Image: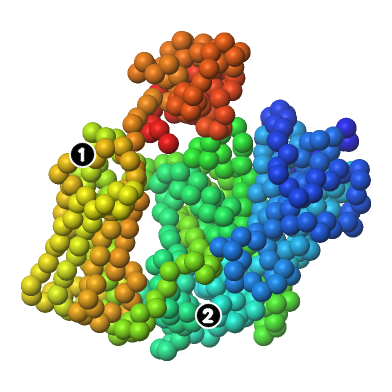
């Protein structure tokens, strides 16, 4: 075995390592090529879309081209497609996931890992073609526009910029600079300006008539913001999952210096270093974050010089949990005197021809002068106090629905209200319907909405699959910017429940459950799909010995990161 990479993988990766020396082996992923490190040199670039480099059968680096239609439909040739790199740091339980790479810089990263593994050279994440729109020197008109640079990065990576004929994030960033005041902004509404030409009064204002590059789409369907001030790990699990499926992601930060709060900032998120011993929703799962920052190299770009000459820098920062009154998030140190507190995240869906857009010729596509009612959120729940949507219910649950009609445009909605609710089963039989109407014209102001009280179906539903649909203004009695978002459907299920870890299904978790798992693994007893679901306490997808071990640890009151004894639903 060659010398351990952990001692020489560079300052960046060393920042993310802990004292643990346990080796966590991975299964070799399904790849088009599996290449032994002894069989290649650092200049070899495999032709396959995915490949895994192994040493003595143990994977060092997995590379995958992001090539699904939903991810790269906006990209015309393979030269512009993006790649991800996924690898374990040997001698640790840490896994690195990094995306937004090109074929060239994937090779560079691979070469750096091979060199580090064999020769002890540093891993240098700089000037490898990362998407990193950069500011220039202070006073050049972009001092407060980190949000615009970050938005340009996300729109470039996800393919939306290419749909509007922008070649690079720097090109798009300069359009933002030309259109907006040099003031603070927000990635969500900056995306709204790019797609629909909208803005919000509290933030930097654009010049009239700018933006609106892809008005047939609605930005609300493409971008989502997450508040990370509370339950940050649970929220980051969604952000991370989306990052791994081709979404772009940004982080908003509060910057603190020696004298307190200094201001807000936005960076582009490209990956994480995680501890595979913990589930994605655990605070201990996220160890470091990989970002590009429009401020990282701005002092090296002379006034009036081309920002494209700035270095593209990928930075890795060690995450530290920040828990205090009103906060449950992460912080990281930027410099010796500055700390960043993570406050929110924004994700942008990758362009795809499957994303709904407006095709009705009656739609004005004008969110400035026409109203636009979108049925969002559409709440489905079994809890009268809950405002979030769930999609799995027990057979004895009373299911409530609550539609919101939100006017997302600048113009007021003035007209009649007619809303129909329909529930259909898997055979397309309508099993429930209700219509809400107002005979007189009603006004829904800009950025306001109507929220109905929660209504139930007034009957229990048997186990099965269902769809609930809300439909508004279907006859176009009032002109709107969009009509395709006047219908919203939610697919939901009714399923029986079980306790996680209750292998023998006796409504409790005890030593007999651990014993039953051991007997199944020894082929003394057999297991069906339901037993496997109840027994898979580590959520690995398989029934194995760690499941029995975790149950025994749970019974001895040892801390475990899995929700044994929680109520779950069968698939």
Q: Quadrant of residue 286?
A: top right
Question: In the picture, which quadrant includes the N terminus?
Answer: top right
Q: Residues within 10 Å of mark 1 (few under 14, many from 20)?
A: some
* 1 vs 2, front mark: 1
Residue 451 marker: none
Question: In the picture, which quadrant includes the C terminus?
Answer: top left
Q: Residues within 10 Å of mark 2 (few under 14, many from 20)?
A: many
- x, y percentage for residue 476? 24, 78
Q: Quadrant of residue 159?
A: bottom right
Q: Which residue is mark 1?
A: 460
For this rendering, which residue is in front, 550 or 340? Answer: 550
User: Which residue corresponds to the image point at 55% horizontal and 16% vertical from the top-left?
Assistant: 520
For this rendering, which residue is in front, 570 or 414? Answer: 570
Seen in the picture, residue 390 relative to 474 is either above or below; the reply is: above
For this rendering, which residue is in front, 331 or 178? Answer: 178
Q: Mark 1 or mark 2: which comes first in sequence?
A: 2
Instruction: State the count of labels.
Output: 2
User: Which residue corresponds to the image point at 57% horizontal and 67% vertical from the top-left?
Assistant: 158
User: Which residue corresponds to the image point at 48% horizontal and 28% vertical from the top-left?
Assistant: 529
Q: Which residue is mark 2?
A: 176
User: Which residue corresponds to the image point at 78% horizontal and 56% vertical from the top-left?
Assistant: 48
C-alpha distance separating marks 1 and 2: 53 Å
Taking the image as shown, residue 503 lies to the left or right of residue 400, namely right
Q: Is residue 108 at least partly visible in the picture?
A: no
Taking the image as shown, residue 66 lies to the left or right of residue 394, namely right
Q: Is residue 504 at least partly visible in the picture?
A: yes
Seen in the picture, residue 340 relative to 538 is either above or below; the reply is: below
SS class, disc 1: loop
- x, y percentage for residue 315? 67, 56
Seen in the picture, residue 26 relative to 73 is either above or below; the reply is: above
């Amino acid at each position: 075995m060659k010398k351990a990479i952990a001692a020489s993988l560079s300052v960046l990766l060393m920042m993310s390592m802990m004292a643990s020396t346990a080796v966590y082996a991975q299964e070799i992923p399904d790849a088009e090529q599996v290449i032994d490190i002894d069989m290649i040199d650092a200049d070899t670039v495999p032709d396959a879309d995915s490949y895994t480099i192994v040493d003595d059968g143990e994977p060092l680096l997995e590379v995958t081209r992001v090539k699904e239609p939903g991810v790269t439909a906006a990209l015309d040739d393979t030269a512009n497609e993006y790649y991800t790199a996924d690898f374990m740091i040997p001698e640790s339980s840490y896994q690195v996931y990094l995306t937004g790479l090109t074929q060239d810089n994937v090779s560079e990263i691979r070469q750096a890992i091979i060199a580090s593994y064999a020769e002890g050279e540093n891993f240098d994440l700089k000037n490898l073609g990362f998407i990193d729109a950069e500011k220039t020197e202070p006073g050049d008109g972009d001092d407060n526009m980190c949000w615009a640079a970050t938005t340009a990065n996300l729109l470039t990576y996800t393919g939306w910029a290419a749909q509007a004929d922008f070649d690079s994030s720097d090109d798009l960033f300069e359009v933002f600079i030309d259109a907006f005041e040099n003031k603070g902004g927000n990635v969500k509404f900056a995306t709204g300006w790019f797609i629909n030409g909208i803005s919000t009064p509290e933030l930097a204002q654009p010049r009239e008539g700018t933006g609106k590059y892809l008005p047939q789409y609605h930005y609300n369907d493409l971008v989502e913001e997450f508040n990370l001030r509370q339950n940050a790990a649970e929220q980051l699990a969604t952000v991370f999952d989306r990052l791994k499926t081709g979404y772009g992601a940004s982080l908003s930060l509060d910057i603190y210096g020696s004298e307190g709060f200094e201001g807000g900032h936005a960076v582009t998120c490209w990956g994480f270093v995680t501890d595979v011993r913990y589930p994605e929703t655990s605070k201990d799962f996220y160890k470091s974050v990989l970002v590009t920052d429009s401020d990282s190299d701005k002092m090296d770009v002379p006034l009036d010089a081309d920002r494209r000459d700035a270095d593209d820098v990928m930075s890795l920062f060690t995450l530290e949990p920040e828990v205090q009154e009103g906060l449950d998030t992460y912080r990281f140190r930027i410099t010796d005197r500055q700390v960043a507190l993570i406050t929110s995240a924004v994700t942008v869906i990758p362009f795809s021809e499957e994303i709904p857009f407006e095709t009705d010729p009656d739609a004005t596509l004008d969110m400035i002068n026409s109203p636009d009612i979108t049925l969002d959120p559409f709440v489905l729940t079994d809890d009268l106090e809950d405002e979030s949507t769930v999609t799995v219910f027990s057979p004895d649950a009373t299911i409530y629905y609550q539609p919101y009609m939100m006017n997302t445009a600048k113009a007021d909605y003035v007209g009649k209200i007619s809303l129909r609710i329909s529930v259909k089963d898997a055979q397309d039989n309508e099993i429930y319907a209700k219509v809400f109407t107002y005979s007189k014209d009603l006004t829904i102001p800009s950025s306001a909405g109507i929220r109905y009280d929660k209504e139930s179906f007034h009957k229990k539903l048997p186990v099965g699959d269902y769809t609930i649909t809300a439909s508004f203004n279907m006859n176009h009695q009032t002109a709107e910017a969009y009509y395709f978002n006047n219908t919203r459907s939610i697919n939901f299920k009714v399923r029986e429940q079980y306790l996680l870890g209750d292998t023998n299904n006796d409504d409790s978790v005890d030593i007999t459950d651990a014993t039953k798992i051991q007997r199944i693994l020894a082929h003394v007893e057999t297991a069906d799909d339901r037993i496997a679901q109840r027994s898979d306490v580590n959520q690995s997808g398989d029934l194995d010995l760690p499941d029995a071990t975790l149950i025994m640890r749970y019974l001895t009151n040892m801390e475990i990161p899995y929700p044994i004894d929680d109520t779950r639903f069968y698939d």
